[in-house]
Protein backbone atom coordinates (compact mmCIF):
# COMPACT_ATOMS: atom_id res chain seq x y z
CA UNK A 1 0.00 0.00 0.00
CA UNK A 2 1.49 3.28 -1.07
CA UNK A 3 1.96 6.23 1.30
CA UNK A 4 -0.65 8.28 -0.56
CA UNK A 5 -3.22 5.50 -0.29
CA UNK A 6 -2.60 5.25 3.46
CA UNK A 7 -3.12 8.99 3.85
CA UNK A 8 -6.33 8.81 1.84
CA UNK A 9 -7.68 5.96 3.96
CA UNK A 10 -6.83 7.82 7.16
CA UNK A 11 -8.62 10.92 5.89
CA UNK A 12 -11.68 8.88 4.96
CA UNK A 13 -11.68 7.19 8.36
CA UNK A 14 -11.43 10.57 10.10
CA UNK A 15 -14.27 11.95 8.01
CA UNK A 16 -16.41 8.94 8.86
CA UNK A 17 -15.69 9.34 12.56
CA UNK A 18 -16.60 13.03 12.37
CA UNK A 19 -19.89 12.17 10.68
CA UNK A 20 -20.59 9.58 13.38
CA UNK A 21 -20.27 12.21 16.14
CA UNK A 22 -23.67 13.64 17.05
CA UNK A 23 -24.14 17.36 16.51
CA UNK A 24 -23.60 19.48 19.62
CA UNK A 25 -26.46 20.87 21.67
CA UNK A 26 -26.33 24.59 20.94
CA UNK A 27 -27.19 26.83 23.90
CA UNK A 28 -27.66 30.48 22.92
CA UNK A 29 -27.40 33.59 25.08
CA UNK A 30 -26.79 37.32 24.68
CA UNK A 31 -24.73 39.04 27.37
CA UNK A 32 -23.34 42.60 27.52
CA UNK A 33 -19.60 42.41 26.82
CA UNK A 34 -19.38 46.07 25.84
CA UNK A 35 -21.34 49.12 26.95
CA UNK A 36 -22.63 50.30 30.32
CA UNK A 37 -23.58 46.87 31.68
CA UNK A 38 -20.48 44.95 30.59
CA UNK A 39 -18.78 45.09 33.99
CA UNK A 40 -21.88 44.01 35.90
CA UNK A 41 -22.58 41.17 33.46
CA UNK A 42 -19.04 39.82 33.22
CA UNK A 43 -19.61 37.16 35.89
CA UNK A 44 -22.83 36.09 34.17
CA UNK A 45 -20.88 35.09 31.05
CA UNK A 46 -18.06 33.51 33.05
CA UNK A 47 -20.45 31.27 34.99
CA UNK A 48 -22.06 30.05 31.78
CA UNK A 49 -18.65 29.18 30.35
CA UNK A 50 -17.84 27.28 33.55
CA UNK A 51 -21.14 25.40 33.27
CA UNK A 52 -20.32 24.47 29.66
CA UNK A 53 -16.98 22.99 30.78
CA UNK A 54 -18.59 21.04 33.60
CA UNK A 55 -21.53 19.68 31.61
CA UNK A 56 -19.23 18.50 28.83
CA UNK A 57 -16.83 16.89 31.29
CA UNK A 58 -19.83 14.96 32.64
CA UNK A 59 -20.87 13.71 29.19
CA UNK A 60 -22.87 16.64 27.85
CA UNK A 61 -26.64 16.73 27.45
CA UNK A 62 -28.39 13.62 26.13
CA UNK A 63 -24.96 12.24 25.27
CA UNK A 64 -24.11 15.25 23.10
CA UNK A 65 -21.49 17.91 23.67
CA UNK A 66 -22.79 21.36 24.63
CA UNK A 67 -21.76 24.36 22.53
CA UNK A 68 -22.40 27.69 24.21
CA UNK A 69 -22.90 30.57 21.79
CA UNK A 70 -22.52 33.92 23.54
CA UNK A 71 -23.38 37.12 21.65
CA UNK A 72 -22.61 40.64 22.80
CA UNK A 73 -25.74 42.79 22.97
CA UNK A 74 -23.70 45.92 23.68
CA UNK A 75 -25.89 46.72 26.71
CA UNK A 76 -28.70 47.55 24.25
CA UNK A 77 -32.03 45.88 25.03
CA UNK A 78 -33.39 46.42 21.52
CA UNK A 79 -30.34 44.71 20.06
CA UNK A 80 -30.90 41.83 22.47
CA UNK A 81 -34.24 41.01 20.87
CA UNK A 82 -32.64 40.88 17.42
CA UNK A 83 -29.89 38.58 18.68
CA UNK A 84 -32.37 36.09 20.12
CA UNK A 85 -34.30 36.16 16.85
CA UNK A 86 -31.00 35.32 15.14
CA UNK A 87 -30.25 32.51 17.59
CA UNK A 88 -33.68 31.02 17.01
CA UNK A 89 -34.16 31.44 13.27
CA UNK A 90 -30.68 31.48 11.77
CA UNK A 91 -28.44 29.64 14.21
CA UNK A 92 -31.10 27.09 15.20
CA UNK A 93 -30.07 27.11 18.87
CA UNK A 94 -31.50 24.12 20.71
CA UNK A 95 -31.77 25.89 24.08
CA UNK A 96 -31.90 29.49 25.27
CA UNK A 97 -30.69 31.18 28.44
CA UNK A 98 -32.01 34.67 29.07
CA UNK A 99 -29.83 37.81 28.89
CA UNK A 100 -28.68 40.09 31.69
CA UNK A 101 -31.17 42.64 33.02
CA UNK A 102 -34.94 43.05 32.98
CA UNK A 103 -35.20 45.28 29.89
CA UNK A 104 -33.11 42.90 27.77
CA UNK A 105 -35.01 39.90 29.14
CA UNK A 106 -38.32 41.46 28.13
CA UNK A 107 -37.10 41.77 24.53
CA UNK A 108 -35.69 38.24 24.46
CA UNK A 109 -38.88 36.78 25.93
CA UNK A 110 -40.99 38.33 23.19
CA UNK A 111 -38.89 36.57 20.54
CA UNK A 112 -38.94 33.25 22.39
CA UNK A 113 -42.70 33.32 22.89
CA UNK A 114 -43.27 34.21 19.25
CA UNK A 115 -41.24 31.18 18.18
CA UNK A 116 -42.63 28.94 20.97
CA UNK A 117 -39.15 28.36 22.35
CA UNK A 118 -38.33 27.84 26.02
CA UNK A 119 -36.34 30.68 27.60
CA UNK A 120 -34.86 30.64 31.10
CA UNK A 121 -35.06 34.04 32.80
CA UNK A 122 -31.81 34.08 34.75
CA UNK A 123 -31.40 37.79 35.43
CA UNK A 124 -34.67 39.64 34.88
CA UNK A 125 -36.17 40.25 38.35
CA UNK A 126 -38.72 42.91 37.39
CA UNK A 127 -42.43 42.07 37.61
CA UNK A 128 -42.92 43.71 34.21
CA UNK A 129 -40.95 40.91 32.55
CA UNK A 130 -43.64 38.34 33.40
CA UNK A 131 -46.61 40.72 33.28
CA UNK A 132 -47.81 39.21 30.04
CA UNK A 133 -48.39 35.52 30.63
CA UNK A 134 -45.88 33.47 28.67
CA UNK A 135 -46.09 29.72 28.21
CA UNK A 136 -42.39 29.25 27.41
CA UNK A 137 -40.79 31.68 29.85
CA UNK A 138 -39.48 30.54 33.26
CA UNK A 139 -37.77 32.58 35.98
CA UNK A 140 -34.89 31.26 38.10
CA UNK A 141 -33.74 34.55 39.66
CA UNK A 142 -35.55 35.80 42.77
CA UNK A 143 -38.09 38.43 41.62
CA UNK A 144 -38.18 41.96 43.00
CA UNK A 145 -41.49 41.08 44.66
CA UNK A 146 -39.69 38.61 46.96
CA UNK A 147 -37.34 41.10 48.61
CA UNK A 148 -39.59 41.83 51.57
CA UNK A 149 -40.54 38.24 52.37
CA UNK A 150 -37.81 37.59 54.91
CA UNK A 151 -38.08 40.82 56.87
CA UNK A 152 -41.85 40.40 57.18
CA UNK A 153 -41.28 36.97 58.69
CA UNK A 154 -38.86 38.52 61.18
CA UNK A 155 -41.30 41.34 62.00
CA UNK A 156 -44.08 38.88 62.72
CA UNK A 157 -41.79 36.69 64.83
CA UNK A 158 -40.81 39.76 66.87
CA UNK A 159 -44.47 40.59 67.53
CA UNK A 160 -44.52 43.84 65.56
CA UNK A 161 -47.89 45.11 64.41
CA UNK A 162 -47.14 48.39 62.56
CA UNK A 163 -44.50 49.18 59.94
CA UNK A 164 -43.32 52.14 57.90
CA UNK A 165 -42.34 51.12 54.35
CA UNK A 166 -40.17 53.43 52.29
CA UNK A 167 -38.96 53.31 48.69
CA UNK A 168 -36.45 55.27 46.68
CA UNK A 169 -38.12 56.80 43.63
CA UNK A 170 -37.08 54.16 41.10
CA UNK A 171 -38.96 51.28 39.49
CA UNK A 172 -37.23 48.38 41.27
CA UNK A 173 -37.48 49.90 44.75
CA UNK A 174 -41.14 50.81 44.24
CA UNK A 175 -41.89 47.29 43.08
CA UNK A 176 -40.21 45.76 46.14
CA UNK A 177 -42.03 48.14 48.48
CA UNK A 178 -45.45 47.59 46.90
CA UNK A 179 -45.16 43.82 47.12
CA UNK A 180 -44.00 44.09 50.75
CA UNK A 181 -46.94 46.35 51.64
CA UNK A 182 -49.42 43.94 50.04
CA UNK A 183 -47.89 40.94 51.80
CA UNK A 184 -47.85 42.79 55.13
CA UNK A 185 -51.55 43.59 54.82
CA UNK A 186 -52.36 39.93 54.14
CA UNK A 187 -50.56 39.06 57.41
CA UNK A 188 -52.50 41.67 59.41
CA UNK A 189 -49.58 44.10 59.70
CA UNK A 190 -50.45 47.80 59.49
CA UNK A 191 -48.31 49.82 57.05
CA UNK A 192 -50.13 52.86 55.69
CA UNK A 193 -49.02 54.38 52.39
CA UNK A 194 -45.50 53.81 51.06
CA UNK A 195 -43.17 56.74 51.71
CA UNK A 196 -41.48 57.59 48.41
CA UNK A 197 -38.24 59.60 48.70
CA UNK A 198 -35.94 61.19 46.14
CA UNK A 199 -32.52 59.71 45.44
CA UNK A 200 -30.77 62.83 46.70
CA UNK A 201 -32.44 62.71 50.14
CA UNK A 202 -29.95 63.25 52.97
CA UNK A 203 -32.30 64.02 55.85
CA UNK A 204 -34.96 61.49 56.80
CA UNK A 205 -36.32 63.49 59.75
CA UNK A 206 -39.76 63.98 58.08
CA UNK A 207 -40.10 60.22 57.61
CA UNK A 208 -39.04 59.62 61.21
CA UNK A 209 -41.81 61.94 62.38
CA UNK A 210 -44.34 60.04 60.28
CA UNK A 211 -43.14 56.73 61.73
CA UNK A 212 -43.48 58.05 65.26
CA UNK A 213 -46.91 59.54 64.59
CA UNK A 214 -48.13 56.23 63.10
CA UNK A 215 -46.70 54.20 65.97
CA UNK A 216 -44.58 52.20 63.52
CA UNK A 217 -42.36 49.68 65.30
CA UNK A 218 -40.44 48.66 62.19
CA UNK A 219 -38.74 50.66 59.44
CA UNK A 220 -38.46 48.85 56.08
CA UNK A 221 -36.68 50.67 53.27
CA UNK A 222 -35.85 49.77 49.69
CA UNK A 223 -33.16 51.91 48.13
CA UNK A 224 -29.41 52.28 47.68
CA UNK A 225 -26.37 52.20 49.96
CA UNK A 226 -26.13 55.96 50.29
CA UNK A 227 -29.77 56.14 51.39
CA UNK A 228 -29.11 53.54 54.09
CA UNK A 229 -26.17 55.53 55.46
CA UNK A 230 -28.23 58.73 55.58
CA UNK A 231 -31.04 56.93 57.41
CA UNK A 232 -28.62 55.69 60.07
CA UNK A 233 -27.12 59.16 60.48
CA UNK A 234 -30.60 60.67 60.84
CA UNK A 235 -31.61 58.05 63.40
CA UNK A 236 -28.55 58.74 65.55
CA UNK A 237 -28.94 62.51 65.28
CA UNK A 238 -32.57 62.32 66.42
CA UNK A 239 -32.03 59.52 68.93
CA UNK A 240 -34.59 57.44 67.07
CA UNK A 241 -34.48 53.65 67.11
CA UNK A 242 -37.35 51.51 65.80
CA UNK A 243 -37.53 47.96 67.13
CA UNK A 244 -36.59 46.72 63.66
CA UNK A 245 -34.52 48.58 61.04
CA UNK A 246 -34.28 47.05 57.57
CA UNK A 247 -32.73 48.68 54.52
CA UNK A 248 -32.17 46.54 51.46
CA UNK A 249 -28.53 47.64 50.99
CA UNK A 250 -27.50 47.39 54.64
CA UNK A 251 -25.71 44.15 53.74
CA UNK A 252 -23.18 46.06 51.61
CA UNK A 253 -19.79 45.97 53.42
CA UNK A 254 -19.27 49.61 52.46
CA UNK A 255 -21.97 50.67 54.93
CA UNK A 256 -19.48 50.16 57.76
CA UNK A 257 -16.98 52.34 55.89
CA UNK A 258 -19.63 55.07 55.74
CA UNK A 259 -21.09 54.96 59.27
CA UNK A 260 -18.75 52.72 61.26
CA UNK A 261 -20.18 50.90 64.25
CA UNK A 262 -23.48 52.73 63.85
CA UNK A 263 -24.25 50.10 61.19
CA UNK A 264 -24.69 47.52 63.96
CA UNK A 265 -28.05 45.69 64.15
CA UNK A 266 -29.15 46.90 60.69
CA UNK A 267 -30.94 44.31 58.56
CA UNK A 268 -30.51 43.95 54.79
CA UNK A 269 -30.86 41.44 51.98
CA UNK A 270 -28.24 39.24 50.37
CA UNK A 271 -29.08 37.51 47.11
CA UNK A 272 -26.04 35.24 47.11
CA UNK A 273 -22.92 34.40 49.07
CA UNK A 274 -20.25 31.77 48.48
CA UNK A 275 -20.89 30.52 52.04
CA UNK A 276 -24.60 29.84 51.53
CA UNK A 277 -25.48 26.20 52.16
CA UNK A 278 -27.47 25.91 48.95
CA UNK A 279 -27.29 22.86 46.66
CA UNK A 280 -23.94 22.64 44.86
CA UNK A 281 -22.80 26.07 46.03
CA UNK A 282 -19.55 25.03 47.66
CA UNK A 283 -18.47 23.15 44.53
CA UNK A 284 -19.60 25.98 42.24
CA UNK A 285 -17.74 28.65 44.23
CA UNK A 286 -14.54 26.58 44.27
CA UNK A 287 -14.71 25.79 40.55
CA UNK A 288 -15.45 29.41 39.61
CA UNK A 289 -12.54 30.68 41.70
CA UNK A 290 -10.21 28.06 40.19
CA UNK A 291 -11.17 29.00 36.63
CA UNK A 292 -11.40 32.77 36.96
CA UNK A 293 -9.17 33.55 39.99
CA UNK A 294 -12.00 35.39 41.75
CA UNK A 295 -14.99 34.49 43.88
CA UNK A 296 -18.37 34.41 42.13
CA UNK A 297 -20.84 37.21 42.77
CA UNK A 298 -24.64 37.34 42.42
CA UNK A 299 -24.55 37.62 38.61
CA UNK A 300 -22.45 34.45 38.38
CA UNK A 301 -24.85 32.59 40.66
CA UNK A 302 -27.82 33.77 38.57
CA UNK A 303 -26.30 32.42 35.35
CA UNK A 304 -25.24 29.14 36.92
CA UNK A 305 -28.69 28.63 38.47
CA UNK A 306 -30.36 29.29 35.11
CA UNK A 307 -28.12 26.77 33.33
CA UNK A 308 -28.59 24.22 36.12
CA UNK A 309 -32.37 24.40 35.83
CA UNK A 310 -32.23 24.16 32.05
CA UNK A 311 -30.00 21.07 32.16
CA UNK A 312 -32.24 19.41 34.75
CA UNK A 313 -35.30 20.02 32.58
CA UNK A 314 -33.55 18.38 29.62
CA UNK A 315 -32.57 15.42 31.79
CA UNK A 316 -36.12 14.92 33.05
CA UNK A 317 -37.71 15.39 29.65
CA UNK A 318 -35.11 13.17 27.99
CA UNK A 319 -35.49 15.40 24.97
CA UNK A 320 -34.88 18.84 23.45
CA UNK A 321 -38.51 19.02 22.38
CA UNK A 322 -39.74 22.46 23.43
CA UNK A 323 -43.20 21.30 24.51
CA UNK A 324 -41.74 18.58 26.72
CA UNK A 325 -39.28 21.04 28.23
CA UNK A 326 -42.06 23.55 28.84
CA UNK A 327 -44.09 20.97 30.75
CA UNK A 328 -41.11 19.94 32.89
CA UNK A 329 -40.12 23.52 33.70
CA UNK A 330 -43.66 24.44 34.71
CA UNK A 331 -43.99 21.58 37.20
CA UNK A 332 -40.54 20.59 38.40
CA UNK A 333 -38.83 21.56 41.63
CA UNK A 334 -35.07 21.44 42.04
CA UNK A 335 -32.27 23.08 43.99
CA UNK A 336 -29.81 25.68 42.70
CA UNK A 337 -27.00 27.78 44.14
CA UNK A 338 -29.61 30.56 44.55
CA UNK A 339 -31.97 28.28 46.44
CA UNK A 340 -35.00 26.27 45.35
CA UNK A 341 -36.52 26.49 41.89
CA UNK A 342 -40.29 26.38 41.63
CA UNK A 343 -42.52 28.55 39.46
CA UNK A 344 -46.15 29.51 39.18
CA UNK A 345 -47.10 27.28 36.23
CA UNK A 346 -49.42 29.92 34.79
CA UNK A 347 -46.88 32.74 34.62
CA UNK A 348 -43.45 31.13 34.98
CA UNK A 349 -42.65 33.46 37.90
CA UNK A 350 -40.25 32.13 40.50
CA UNK A 351 -42.07 31.52 43.80
CA UNK A 352 -39.51 29.57 45.85
CA UNK A 353 -36.16 31.40 45.85
CA UNK A 354 -36.04 34.49 48.07
CA UNK A 355 -33.11 36.73 49.08
CA UNK A 356 -31.64 35.97 52.49
CA UNK A 357 -31.82 38.53 55.30
CA UNK A 358 -28.60 39.42 57.08
CA UNK A 359 -27.97 41.49 60.17
CA UNK A 360 -24.81 43.43 60.99
CA UNK A 361 -23.58 41.86 64.22
CA UNK A 362 -20.19 42.72 65.65
CA UNK A 363 -19.19 44.29 62.39
CA UNK A 364 -20.10 41.39 60.10
CA UNK A 365 -23.24 40.50 58.14
CA UNK A 366 -24.76 37.30 59.53
CA UNK A 367 -27.64 35.46 57.89
CA UNK A 368 -30.65 35.52 60.20
CA UNK A 369 -33.29 34.31 57.69
CA UNK A 370 -34.18 31.78 56.34
CA UNK A 371 -33.53 29.20 59.03
CA UNK A 372 -31.84 26.84 56.54
CA UNK A 373 -29.06 29.40 55.98
CA UNK A 374 -29.12 31.00 59.43
CA UNK A 375 -25.77 31.84 61.05
CA UNK A 376 -27.11 33.94 63.95
CA UNK A 377 -30.35 34.75 65.75
CA UNK A 378 -31.84 38.16 64.90
CA UNK A 379 -31.41 40.82 67.57
CA UNK A 380 -33.62 43.88 68.23
CA UNK A 381 -32.46 47.30 67.05
CA UNK A 382 -31.46 48.84 70.40
CA UNK A 383 -31.84 52.45 71.59
CA UNK A 384 -28.75 54.55 70.93
CA UNK A 385 -28.22 55.12 74.64
CA UNK A 386 -27.78 51.37 75.19
CA UNK A 387 -25.10 50.81 72.57
CA UNK A 388 -21.52 50.02 73.50
CA UNK A 389 -18.31 50.54 71.59
CA UNK A 390 -17.14 47.33 69.95
CA UNK A 391 -13.57 46.23 70.61
Image: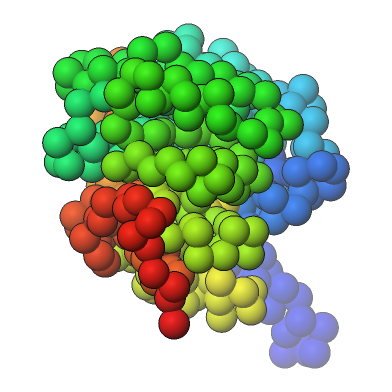
Residue 275 in view of the camera: yes
At x 51%, y 48%, the residue is 236
Q: How many marks?
A: 0
Instruction: Quarter of the image for the N terminus: give it.
Output: bottom right
Q: Nearer the viewer, residue 148 or 14?
A: 148
Question: In the figure, 320 relative to 33: above or below?
Answer: above
Which quarter of the figure has residue 199?
Answer: top right
Q: Quadrant of the C terminus?
A: bottom left
Q: Residue 210, image x and y in percent?
A: 45, 20
Residue 191 in picture, x, y percent from top left: 32, 18
In the image, what residue occupies the spot 38% across and 26% down? Answer: 212
Kindly identify the residue that appears in the image at 21 percent across and 60 percent down: 377
Q: Is residue 325 left or right of residue 132?
A: left
Residue at the (56%, 71%) spot, across then down: 295
> Relative to residue 210, is residue 289 depicted above or below?
below
Residue 373, placed above or below residue 328: below
Query: 372 or 71: nearer the eye?
Result: 372
| Residue 349 seen in this snapshot | no
* Residue 96: image location, x then y, percent: 54, 37
- Give coordinates of residue 240: x percent, y percent: 43, 41
Q: Please state if 212 lies on the left or on the right of 46 as rendered.
A: left
Amino acid sequence: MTFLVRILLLLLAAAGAARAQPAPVVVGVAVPQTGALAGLASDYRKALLLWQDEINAAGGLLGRRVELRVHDDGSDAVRTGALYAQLIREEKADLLVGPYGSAATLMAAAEAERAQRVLINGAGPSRAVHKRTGRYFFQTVAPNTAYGAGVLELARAAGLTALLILARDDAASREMAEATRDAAASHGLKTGEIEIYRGATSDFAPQVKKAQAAGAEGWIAFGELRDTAEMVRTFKKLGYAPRLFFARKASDPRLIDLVGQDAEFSLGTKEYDVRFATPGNREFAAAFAAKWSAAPGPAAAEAYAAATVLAEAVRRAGSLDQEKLRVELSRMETGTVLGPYKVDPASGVQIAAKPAVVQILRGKPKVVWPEALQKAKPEPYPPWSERRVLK
